[in-house]
Amino acid sequence: MIFESLATELLANVGFPIFISVYLMVRIENKIENVSVNTQRLFDRFMKEEYRD
């Protein structure tokens, strides 16, 4: 009974923050990837306009 309580407390105090951290890192990584893709598209479009004139 004490072991189960300790395991539950450990999971709540350690596992949950780790889960939240990983979740936020994945979201941030996706945002950075989207910014990178959009920056590349904008650059490509700019270069296309630059050489068209």
Image (spheres, rainbow, N blue to C red):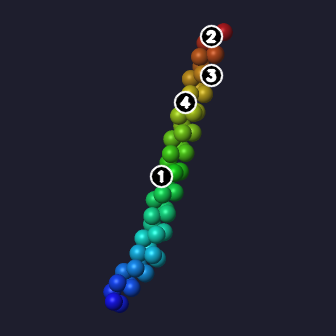
> CA separation, marks 2 and 4?
18 Å
**Residue 12 figure quarter:** bottom left
Q: Which tag, 1 or 2, sits closer to the chain's start? A: 1
Q: Which tag, 2 or 4, sits closer to the chain's start? A: 4
Nearer to me, 50 or 28: 28
Q: Which tag, 4 or 3, sits closer to the chain's start? A: 4
Query: Which three-letter amino acid code belongs to the residue tagged 2?
Result: Arg
> CA separation, marks 2 and 3?
10 Å
Check disc 2 and report its element: helix, strand or loop: helix
**Image spot of residue 3 (x, y percent):** 33, 86
Task: Classify residue 19 as left or right of residue 49.
Answer: left
> CA separation, marks 1 and 2?
39 Å
Residue at the bottom extreme of this rendering: 2
Q: Which tag, 1 or 4, sits closer to the chain's start? A: 1
Pointer 3: what residue? 46
Q: Which mark is residue 52?
A: 2
> CA separation, marks 1 and 3?
30 Å
User: Dot 4: few (<14), some (14–19), or many (≥20) neighbours within 10 Å?
Assistant: few
